[in-house]
Amino acid sequence: MSRIWNFSAGPAVLPLPVLEQIRDELLDWHGAGLGVMEMSHRGKEFTAIIEQAEADLRELLAIPANYRVLFLQGGATQQFAQIPMNLLANGLANKSADYLVTGSWSKKAFKEAQRIASVRCAGSTEGAAFQSLPELATLDLDPQAAYFHLCTNETIHGVEVPPEYVLPVNVPVVADMSSHILSRPIDVSRYGLIYAGAQKNVGAAGVTLVIVREDLLGHAAPSIPSVMDYAVMAENGSMLNTPPTFSIYVAGLVFQWLKKQGGLAAIERVNIEKAALLYACIDGSAGFYRNPVAVACRSRMNVPFTLADSTLDVAFLAESKAAGLASLKGHKSFGGMRASIYNAMSLEGVRVLVDFMNDFSRRYAGTKA
Ligand SMILES: *Cc1c(COP(=O)(O)O)cnc(C)c1O
């Protein structure tokens, strides 16, 4: 078996020990005589799995007691609709919500919310090609907003909201953390609701984490489907219907792996080192490679970059692939390249990438493809 260095934005690389444990337990989980995929979600085995997963997530993120953890389906995309359905729709006809648009994902969230309710754009960096973050003071904020929505890591444009970024304080802040949750410690109490699809930094596709402050439950419009109502899901322990059991199990194994790494402060140190190495390679390439994002909000998880001579893109992709480096092609809306370096991508993997990039630029600098 030979595994590639996988820089996919998602579904993405998983920690090897987690995959090995899944393999070892696939046919017989802990002597139960059956695998997790085959178990009743109401049985004692799966109950233990989901309870342990929630406990570990709470420990990793230091989630306060007045927050509920939900394991939902439909991806972050479903949350784009479910959030306004729950926080904005019921008897709040005069209310609106504010959206900060800093890249493709927050733009999609804003657009989807417009199907459900009246929402406002409080600020957008689209006119400046999504390369920075506007300061809070420059935003057009509605003090009566039901919530303020932002995406704290734009997976496509590589813009990450740093912890010192000032957030509105008098309205609940709703954050799409799909592509950087668990990459660093966060202060959960700054947010009313945090959501993240699993397939970037948490595990396998199919489960979406929602961490929601209790006072935000119970405001859904009565007409919405019960599976879409956070309060109903919370009352039923995320099991109003059959939850994505296998994806919850995989997420739980990733939480345990993170605890073994020393928790989020420890994984953050590795993530800082990985990102520093890659950005130094880009910035030190004398313009051969370029990342346009303002340094203060460059993502540690998703690093988009272009080659000054885009006719070399084809050679870069072919040669990197031959060197065992996979999924480096950039998103179509950005072009160029993107290296996603989530928790499960090791420092060694980033070193291999940087060595390749340095070698490639040495060989091709000054040439025309
Ligand atoms: C991938 C991604 C999404 C969409 O996730 P789905 O699970 O495909 O719905 C939304 N927001 C961000 C920040 C993402 O990275």
Image (tube, helix red, strand yellow):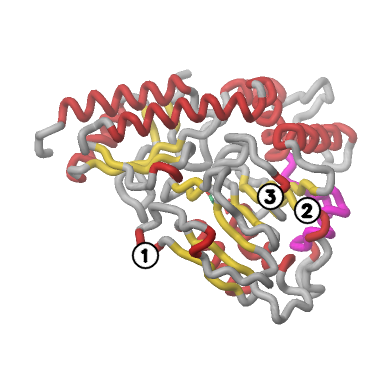
State whether residue 136 appears in this view: yes
Which contiguous range is marked in magenta? 227-245
The residue shown at (10%, 34%) is 366
Q: For mark 1, what is the residue?
A: 127
Which residue in the protein does label 3 denote?
190
User: Residue sitting at 68 percent across and 62 percent down?
Assistant: 83
In the rendered image, the residue lying farthest to the front is 137
> Rounded to the nearest whole Å, what is the CA distance between mark 3 and mark 2?
10 Å
Q: Is mark 2 within 8 Å of ligand 1?
A: no
Give amino acid for label 1: Gly
Rendered view: 81 above or below 184 = below
- Residue 160 left/right relative to 18: left
- Ligand 1 within 8 Å, label 1 CB: no
Return the residue found at the far bottom. 94
Can you tell which of label 3 and label 2 is closer to the viewer?
A: 3
Give the SS element for disc 1: helix
Q: Which residue type does callout 2 highlight? A: Arg
Question: Mark 1 or mark 3: which comes first in sequence?
Answer: 1
Question: Which residue type carries mark 3?
Answer: Arg
- Where residue 122 appears, as percent x and y from the top left, is 53, 68
* Residue 274 falls in image quadrant: top left
Circle 3 sits in a helix, a strand or a loop, which is it? helix
Q: Label 2 belongs to which residue?
A: 213
What is the x, y in percent for residue 224? 76, 70
